[in-house]
Structures are given as C-alpha cells and as structure tokens.
Image (tube, rainbow, N blue to C red):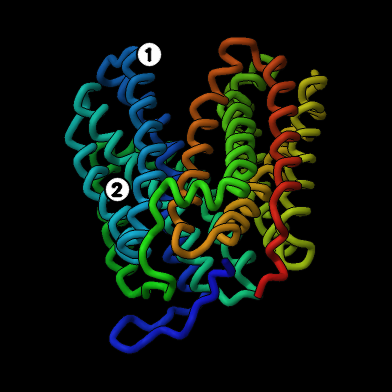
Amino acid sequence: MSGTIVPLKGGRPSKPSESRLIVLGGIGWLFDAMDVLLLSYVLAYLGVHYAWTIADKADVLLANNLGLLVGALLFGRVADRWGRRRAFVTTLIIYSVLAAAMGFFTSPVPLLFVRFLMGLGLGGELPVVSSLVSELSSPGRRGRNVVLLESFWSYGTILAGALAAFVLPLVGYSILMWALAATALYAAVLRRGVPEPERARGALPLGSMFRGERGRLVPAWVAWFAIAFGYYGFAMWLPSMLVRWGLSLVSSLEFSFAMTLLQVPGYFSAAYLVERWGRRPTFASYMAISAASALALAFSHAVVPVLAAGSLFNFFNVGAWGTIYAYSPELFSDRDRATAVGSCTAMARVGMIVGPYLPAISGFGASLGAFFAALLVGASSVAFLPETVRRR
C-alpha cells in the first residue's frame, strides 16, 4: 500500500528532477484550470458575435462537465491497466487535438461533441498526473510536490483572465484556440521523457477494487464532493453577488481577481504543512476555515467584511484542494491507485456540476449555509482515513 518506487531499470527514460516533474505535470493542471474559466469567456464571446442563446451555452457547459467526469473515470483505469506514462501523454494530446478542432466551429451543435471529447482529456489529466508525481517523488517530499503541482491551478486561472482580457479581443476565438492547441502539443512531446513508475502490474477488477478499498473510497468520495460543491458554488457566483452587494461590475471583477491571487500563498502554506503537520489535520483545518469563511460571508453586508471572508475562503479552500490531491494517491495500492483517484476526482466533477446550481435555485445567501455544512462534512470525513505522512 505504500506505493514505494523501486529503482528504474535500463532501457527507459531516466527519472527527471522533481522540479522538472512538477512543471511537466503542472502544465496539464494549468491547462485544465485555464480551460474551465476560459470556456466561460469564450461562450460570452460566441454569444455576442454568433447570437448564441443561454440554452446553447448551458448545453455546451453541461457537455464539457460530463466529459470531465467520464474522463476522470476512464483514464484512471487506463493508467492502471496500460501505464501512467501513456495516459500522462495521451490526455494532453487529446486536449491539443480537440482544442485545435474547436477553433473551426462557432455553432453550438458541433461544439457539444468537441467539448465533451476535450473534457475526456482534461478530466483524465488530474488523477493520472497526481498519481504519477506522487509515485516518482521521494517519500519525504511527496506531499509537498503534489501540492505544488496543484498550485498550477492558480496560475491557470490567472492566465485565463489575462487571455480573456487582452488576447481574445485582439486575435479572436479561433486563433486563440489554435495557439493553445500548439502549446499543449509541445508540452505533450516534452512529457515523453518522463518514465513509467515501477509498480505492481495488473489492475484489479473493479468489483474487487471496490470491495478492497471501500473503507477508504467512501470517506474520500465525501471529501472530494464536498470541497468541489463548496468551491465551485462559491467561486462561480461571487462576482455577481459582489455587484448585488453594492460594487460596480468592474470593481467586482477586480476584487474577485485580487482574491484569486491569494490562492497562490494558500497552496504554498499547505505544501509546507502537509509534511510537517500531516495530511489529515491540514485538510481538516483548511476545510473548517473555508466553512467558517462561507458562513461569515452569509452574515456580511458591507464591502470590507465581504472581501475579508472571500479572501480567507480563497486562501484556505485551495490549500485544502492541494492537500487532498497529495493525500488521495497515498491511500490506495499501486495496482488500483489511478482508478481510485479517478473515481474521487469524478465525485469532485459531480460537485462541480451541482454546486453552482444551488444559488440559482435558493439564492446565494441561503446557499452559503449549505456550502458551510458540506465543507464541515468534508473536513470530518478524513477522520475515517489513516494519516499517511509517516509512511516512508
């Protein structure tokens, strides 16, 4: 269960430095985050220039999210059966090819299929990369490295905002997508130099895996659903709520961007604590503070306390994300690790789909109470899981 890596044998790529490994893995993470946010900007662009309806945009978003969910399940299994390295390269190639194809279409129907297929690649990226980086990292830095890998999510969100503000209006939608496709393809080529970790061969049947791992899978699924439900429900609606609470649209976007910048130190603080304090206490405490921030926001009506609560949420919630990505691969045996982590990230995709709908139904203020409860449940779920930081 420890996932210890034995020395690599000759005839294959040598093990890269851990810094290079984090960067090569993090590029895919960056594309995932960037694509999630950039898609919302692209849909707005298509709505203005090609008269898309709200229903058209919602359908494409749903197709994309379903692709992310299926991709997480599919490529986790592929990585266990045919190898991490193959899946590691393939997911980014799928994104590159479909991003290029996306640039040729401006109508909703073909983009439904393109975005679903793109989602397969991006959805499969996260469980495969987190498992591979965990397995190729030295035990004393394994948790830190995966949290640093997750920090590329913040860089992707920042880059998405910059591309939407400065590049999309200048070059247009198609050229932007083709440029992203070329960049992703180059990154996929670079990934070919990453070796396959040594591990037990032969993935377990799914039924056997679930029976053997269900004591860890179920609490992990709860944690993953809870963090995504709270994060996406909060983040997708915050700019609109800032406007409702008195800020101009421009100011709300500026403040939302400023709060996003706090995600970077949130990741680095978690990277420090996961090795010194442990995976469980870091995740539980960061989730609890995220929950308290959501509750504080529900009772805040002035700009300053709203911004303070939103900033705390961004800092601690993304730190919890980094921690759960570091923690989850260590919970499962190397024969079914990517499949198990893939099922966890699929649960997060469910939370990602459900969370943003709640404010639309019950209002943002009332939804913050649900986010508070869900985040606390997620924080408590790790009490049923073992601590892994001392497993060397």
The number of numbered discs placed on residues in the rendered structure image is 2
Q: Residue 151, can we see it? A: no
**Secondary structure beneath label 2:** helix
Q: Is residue 277 left or right of residue 131?
A: right
User: Is 331 on the left or on the right of 245, as rendered?
Assistant: left
Rendered residue at 35%/36% (across/down): 67
Which is nearer the eye, 148 or 238? 148
Q: Identify the residue shown where x is 69% and y is 51%.
A: 385
Quarter of the image where the C terminus is located: bottom right
Quadrant of residue 363 within the rendered picture: top right
- Residue 233 image-quadrant placement: top right
The amino acid type, in three-letter code, at marker 1 is Ile
Dot 2 corresponds to which residue? 95
Mark 2 surroundings within 10 Å by alpha-carbon count, few (fewer than 14), some (14 through 19), many (20 or more): many
x and y percent of residue 51 in the render?
A: 28, 14
Q: Residues within 10 Å of mark 1 (few under 14, many from 20)?
A: few
Picture coordinates of residue 40, whole percent (x, y):
42, 29
Q: Which mark is residue 54?
A: 1
Q: Earlier in the sequence, mark 1 or mark 2?
A: 1
Q: Is residue 326 above or below residue 263?
A: below
**Which residue is at a point 36% across and 43% down the rendered structure image?**
71
